[in-house]
Image (tube, helix red, strand yellow):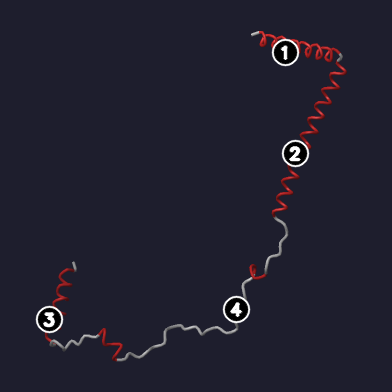
Amino acid sequence: MSVVSDLLAMFKRLLNQCQELFKSIIQDRRIFLIIAALVVVVCICILTLSIAMSSRLKTSTVSDSFSVAEIPQEEIFTMDEPDFLPPILLQREPQPWTVENILPFWTDPLENGELEWRERIRSSVDILLQEVP
């Protein structure tokens, strides 16, 4: 405990000395005002310099990242179109149907007899008409 009490005593003495020094400075108001004004001026100068340096650093990093670089013309402009263009077809050109083209889709109605087809068509139309309200 003696070490702690020694440290406390030393700290109290240091505080007392600081208080006496401050009291002696305060007693002479002229010196106190001059010192206070100098402290304020120094703080303002430090603040101004720090703001100026930080803005200068910011602008230099921005300008460095946007340095002038040559951009190839192919990236900016599209290439010219060729002089020849294929003709525009407004509709498909008609192609004649051949027997080979038709055969997969054709069913001969007379193959099983005409009457059977007529009955099939008539029954499907009757069913359709009965379901319509």
SS state under label 2:
helix
The residue type indicated by label 4 comes to Glu
Q: Which mark is residue 81?
A: 4
Disc 4 + disc 3, Cβ < 8 Å: no
- The residue where tag 2 is placed is 51
Going from the N terminus, do you reach mark 2 or mark 4 first? 2
Identify the residue shown where x is 71% and y is 64%: 70
Viewport quadrant of the C terminus: bottom left
Camera-side mark, 1 or 3: 1
**2 vs 83: above or below:** above
- Viewed as shown, does residue 85 lie left or right of 105? right
**14 vs 85: above or below:** above
User: In this orientation, which residue lies closer to the viewer: 99 or 127?
Assistant: 99
Disc 2 + disc 4, Cβ < 8 Å: no
**69 vs 82: above or below:** above
Spatial separation of the CA atoms under disc 1 and disc 3: 122 Å
Spatial separation of the CA atoms under disc 2 and disc 4: 55 Å
Viewport quadrant of the N terminus: top right
Q: Which mark is residue 119?
A: 3
Going from the N terminus, do you reach mark 1 or mark 4 first? 1
Spatial separation of the CA atoms under disc 1 and disc 2: 38 Å
Image coordinates for residue 28, horizontal then vertical, percent:
87, 14
The residue type indicated by label 1 comes to Phe
Disc 1 + disc 2, Cβ < 8 Å: no
Image coordinates for residue 40, horizontal then vertical, percent:
80, 27
The residue type indicated by label 3 comes to Glu
